[in-house]
Image: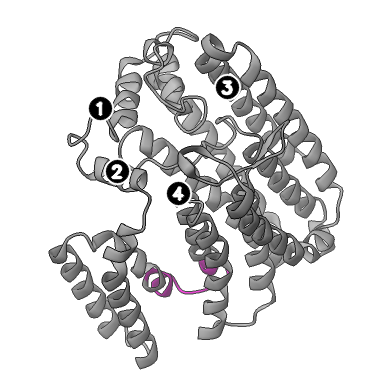
Amino acid sequence: MRKTEQTILIIMIILCGLGVLSIYSSTRDSAGYGYAIRQVIWIALGFALMLLVRKIHIRTLMAFALPFYGITVVLLGLVLVVGTGPFATKRWFDLGFMRFQPSEVAKIGLVMMLARYLSDIRGFSLGTILKVFAMALIPAVLVLFEPDLGTAVVLGIIAFPMLFAAGLDWIHVIFLASPFIALACSSRLAAWIVFAGLLVILLIFGRFRVWLVSLVLAINVGVYAIAPFAWENLAQYQRDRLIAFVRPDKDVLGAGFQTTQSMIAIGSGGIAGKGLFKGTQKALGLIPEQHTDFIFSVIGEEMGFVGSLGVILLLGFLLTKFLRLASELRDKFSIFFCFGFTTLLIVQMFINIGMTLRIMPVTGLPLPLLSYGGSHMLMLWLACGIIFAAYRTRLEY
């Protein structure tokens, strides 16, 4: 292995090790070493998968993009029929000895598919852009029906940075993303009017084609019109979480309980933390899902500001290493995949840490390499193997 690969592996192993320690700390009173041992097994299996995939030629992996994407779509549809999950959700296949989450596979499958498609195009057209969003929306909508709003949002977001990486002008990317902004502003008429006004000004002074202006405005008006319907069709716990995000004081003991206790835990850690295995909020079980979605609150309480900052810096360093590696690749598929996967990690990192600090709504997104989860861990190492395979064969292009 080359030095760049070795550096990436060292960082990933350190983060996985910190994750195992935090998982053990958060579950040892209820499950002993159980969760920690299983996480170590998943890490070992993921590492072996990475070594295997790394040996495969990148052209072979590129050829497998469409079948892999198709398989993930089928699995997402199947899990809605026979899947299991908490709160009447259907997110996992229960295989007895393990649970398998197809939405984690869909993240990598979508990045592979978009990278494959964008590497073959020659310039952008309306049809090209619509195809990209159709590829992203199919798995996103299926995941939304599980329901898993957080993962659905991530799947939808991936299309934007990958279009930018493929050469679409940034102002066009902003216009394409405007329906999401319109949806966020739809709860307040005044906010939506201000947003719509700014959008119209940009469209007028940007001298865009009439069809593009008409399309963007029509989509945004349509989003505003269907927003109430979309709100009513969210699961009750999802509506409660969004209300708790906007009005954290409204239901401190209900929907806002997780984030309130998370902030107390992180704040109580101070500069240096309470010490490994000595967290009180964690020990009292006041933070639900503290070994999965809220693992960062355990790190904040026991390792303090220094430990939390260290984890963020390690994740940031890992992301920069992936981007640096992408800059050395030569074929479009490899570059787009590496960029898309790095963007995926950035989005998940921001949302996961943000929800523990109440700057983002609560979603079921894991913190990369640190949260407990087999499907999540295997897919991260799989993606790493694909990137290493691209790096290994980069000189052939």
Where in the figure is residue 328, as x and y percent of width and height?
Answer: 69, 55
Q: Nearer the viewer, mark 1 or mark 3?
A: 1
> For mark 4, what is the residue?
150
Q: Which residue position holds label 2?
A: 240
Question: Residue 18, which numbered label?
Answer: 3
Whichever of labels 4 and 3 marks the residue nearer the N terminus, that label is 3
Looking at the image, which residue is at 13% across and 65% down?
Answer: 190
Instruction: Say which element carries label 1.
Output: loop
Left or right, 19 with respect to 37, comes to left
Q: How far is the residue under mark 4 from the one under mark 3?
A: 24 Å
| Amino acid type, callout 1 | Leu
Magenta segment boundaries in residue numbering:
163-174
- Main SS, magenta region, reads helix
State the residue position of label 1. 253
Disc 4 to disc 1, C-alpha distance: 22 Å
Q: State the SS at label 4.
A: helix
Mark 4 is on which residue type?
Answer: Gly
| Front position among marks 4 and 1 | 1
Asked which secondary structure carries label 2, the reply is: helix
- Is residue 265 left or right of 291 when viewed as pictured? left
Locate residue 149, reporting x and y percent: 44, 51
User: N-terminal of the two: label 1 or label 2?
Assistant: 2
